């Protein structure tokens, strides 16, 4: 664990190398960079490369090049999540020992079928996990075996309200078990979920503020529960408004026309993109 002075601003960029960065990434990263600069703080680059099936080395090189083209700076070396699995396994063992998690063999399809309708909100977010799929709290939890061959879920405290004040959107509130349910912390392909890896990395680096897109607002409530269960002090959060396309859909890596690489080839300059 990194020892850091919590009074010093520490932020991070956290792109995932599953495609080329687009205009939405640029707006979020530029906001993060400006906030760190205004606070006289430091920025770190985290390579979120846990999706082995989709992450590619050429996208890692491209994201670094595009970010430097934007004028972004960070402390070297870059942090790659794929090289930090022992840290995540240690955190999982702590959650297991504390009785916070249970094994789950249900698929996303099972969850959606039980709910009767897709989860309201981001299609990439986890659907609300049915209470009837849970094991009883009194049921013994099997040993934690590594490598994992099953999913592990965090049991949320049903009915408990969670609150935080977002740096952009102001006060936020959600109720565990209603606005979101039990969520994955480890996958059956023996990899940590985004939620667990993100919390462990932010705590390890002593991150004081997380700047990211508003599509991850619901994830913040899950991560607050993980911070608490693991005994970490959570960072502050600043969620940026999403950049939308002409059809009012949020940008994704399929929007090649708005990738930074394409915009550069069209003659756009970093100064144009830096304009709020």
Image (spheres, helix red, strand yellow):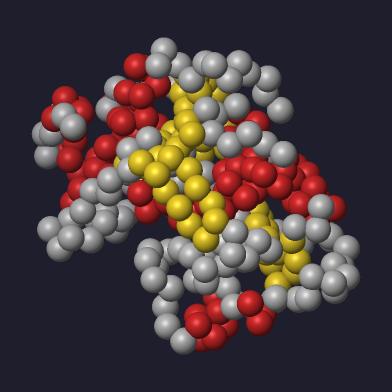
Answer with left or right where residue 213 lies relative to residue 249: right
Taking 274 as reference, is 105 left or right? right
Q: Nearer the viewer, residue 74 or 97?
A: 97
Question: Does residue 134 show up?
Answer: yes
Image quarter (top left, top right, bottom left or bottom right) of the C terminus:
top left
Figure disc tally:
0
Residue at point 16%, 29% (across, down): 275
At which x and y percent is residue 123? 39, 68
Where residue 79 sits, quadrant-wise, is: top right
Which residue is the extreme one toward the top? Answer: 40
Query: Could you tell me residue 75's position as x and y percent?
Result: 50, 19
User: Would residue 259 be seen by someone viewing this image from the given angle?
Assistant: no
Residue 246 position in % (x across, y down): 12, 58
Q: Residue at x 40, y 32 (%)?
A: 64
For the residue pair 63 and 204, the one nearer the viewer reads as 204
- Residue at point 65%, 61% (across, down): 157
Q: Residue at x 50, y 48 (%)?
A: 163
């Amino acid at each position: 664990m990194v020892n850091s002075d919590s009074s010093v601003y520490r932020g991070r960029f956290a792109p995932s190398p599953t495609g080329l960065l687009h205009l939405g990434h640029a707006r979020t990263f530029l906001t993060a960079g400006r906030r760190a600069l205004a606070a006289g703080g430091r920025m770190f680059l985290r390579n979120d490369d846990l999706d082995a099936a989709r992450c590619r080395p050429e996208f890692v090189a491209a994201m670094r090049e595009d970010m430097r083209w934007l004028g972004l700076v960070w402390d070297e070396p870059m942090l790659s999540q794929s090289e930090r699995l022992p840290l995540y396994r240690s955190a999982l063992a702590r959650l297991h020992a504390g009785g916070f998690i249970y094994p789950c063999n249900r698929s996303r399809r099972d969850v959606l079928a039980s709910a009767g309708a897709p989860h309201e909100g981001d299609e990439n977010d986890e659907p609300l996990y049915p209470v009837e799929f849970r094991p009883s709290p009194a049921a013994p939890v099997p040993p934690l075996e590594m490598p994992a061959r099953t999913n592990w879920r965090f049991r949320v405290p049903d009915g408990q309200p969670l609150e935080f004040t977002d740096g952009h959107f102001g006060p936020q509130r959600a109720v565990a078990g209603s606005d979101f349910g039990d969520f994955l912390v480890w996958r059956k392909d023996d990899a940590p979920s985004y939620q667990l890896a993100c919390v462990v990395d932010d705590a390890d680096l002593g991150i004081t503020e997380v700047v990211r897109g508003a599509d991850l607002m619901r994830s913040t409530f899950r991560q607050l529960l993980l911070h608490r269960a693991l005994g970490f002090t959570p960072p502050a959060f600043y969620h940026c408004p999403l950049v939308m396309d002409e059809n009012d859909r949020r940008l994704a890596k399929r929007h090649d026309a708005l990738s930074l690489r394409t915009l550069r080839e069209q003659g756009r300059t970093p100064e144009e993109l830096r304009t709020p």
